[in-house]
Image (cartoon, helix red, strand yellow):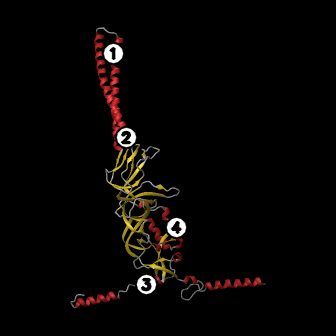
Amino acid sequence: MRGLLILLVLVGISVGVFALGKLRSEDGDKPLLNVAEDVALTVNIARPEEESIVRLVQAPGEVEPVVEVEISSEIVARIEELPVEEGDFVKKGDLLCRLDDDKLLAELESARARIAQLRSAIDVARPDVDKASRDLERQKRLAETNATSSLEMADYLTTHLKAKATLSMRQHELTQAQAGEKRILEDLTRAVIESPIDGIVAKLNAEQGEVVVTGTMNNAGTVVMVISDLAEMQVRARVDEVDVPLVKPGQKARIYLQADSEVPIPAEVVRVATKGTRLSGRDVVTFETLLKVLSNDPRIKSGMTANTEIEVAQSDGAVTVPVEAVIHRMRKELSEEIVKEFNERQENTDLSDRARHAQFIKVIYVIEDGKAAVRLVDPGIADTRRVELKSGIGMDDLVIIGPYRSLDQLEDGKKVTVADEDKELLEPADDSESDAEAEDDDAALAQGEKP
């Protein structure tokens, strides 16, 4: 019996709710129970602004000199003199390092002795060739009168050829020895290392008395020091593959140092890599982009970490709204008129079928007669705060920009109420004072007075 009573009560409640739902209010012809429909959403609003807007591409990077030279030795020798220290300023041609050249001087002396020896050998070989030539000619004359044998003739011919070959060999050996002398003289000049540029000794890797070695395929060799020209600096930035098609040489940029992220430093894009680099352990491809620093700011130091902002597009006099005003709505949530207008716009645009039949459409909501009204918009460029709208908005419109929970619940025709902090935007500008001043000026002009 108790269960039956409970069941009857539930059935009665259901019937009552259904009956009330069928009843309509006298003013709006809406269900009496549909109270949620009449509850207005509290929203924040903003008015469109006409301003210049710049689209930015952001990328991290490192500061480095445009010209930086690693000083290495081209010979194996001990450092005999190292007159510079880290941080010293050097000019082109200044002595950076002097290597021990005693071994080279000894090799030079030996090479010159070898050259002298070979020249003497050539002086000896030339008369031998002349004598062999004379003997051969005499044998030829004797052969004409059958006064000599063919065997003797062959012997004299062989002796002549051997004399000529010995002279040629000595001459080639002399050429080889002279080339060795030239190499040693060049190595002697390499024992004195001079600065190739004006700059700062940015890094000193060796000390006096150390032995420096030359680089090979498997050994990088000894880098004695690094000279940096700090007069011109650049930033080697890593631009994401999504943004790199927008970046071009010559575009303006700004650099923010980690040491002072508030003050920007002007820069300019110099070069964009044509091949991307995949970061180790990450599925991200970036493109190396060089930015020339257009400032001699003393805060800029080689090796600093920097964040860059590249201006890839600009629109002057654009109608903009806060970026949070533009929201995505599914096709099925919008009216047929909005979807039809969107489709017509896509037909005139060179897009893929996938983009043409996008499931989400960009719209904004404005306030009309206390209700939210949806507008199809054509967004342009955007920065971190505002977005350009090329159509669908007027300067007198009140655009709904938040809060997020209200934007998510917005529908076309939904009742809204403006938050207290934004109600001043509902009031028209007070022009009474300016009108009064204009009337006073007109009266003064009528009396011939200067306003």
| Residue that appears at 34% across and 41% down | 186
Which residue is disc 2 drawn over?
A: 102
Specify the amino acid type for callout 1: Tyr
Quarter containing the C terminus: bottom left
For residue 22, side relative to residue 302 (left or right): right
Q: Residues within 10 Å of mark 4 (few under 14, many from 20)?
A: few
Q: Are marks 2 and 3 in contact (CB under 8 Å)?
A: no
Specify the amino acid type for callout 2: Asp
For residue 323, side relative to residue 10 (left or right): left
In this rendering, which labeled residue sits more in front, label 3 or label 1? Answer: 1
**Sequence-wise, which precedes: disc 2 or disc 3?**
2
> In the image, which disc is placed on residue 424?
3
Specify the amino acid type for callout 3: Glu
Which residue is disc 1 drawn over?
A: 156
Q: Are marks 2 and 4 in contact (CB under 8 Å)?
A: no
In this rendering, which labeled residue sits more in front, label 2 or label 3? Answer: 2
Secondary structure under the numbered disc 1 in the rendered image: helix
Q: Residues within 10 Å of mark 2 (few under 14, many from 20)?
A: few
For residue 132, side relative to residue 238 (left or right): left
Secondary structure under the numbered disc 4 in the rendered image: loop
Specify the amino acid type for callout 4: Gln
Secondary structure under the numbered disc 2 in the rendered image: helix
- In depth, the one of 267 and 319 nearer the eye is 267
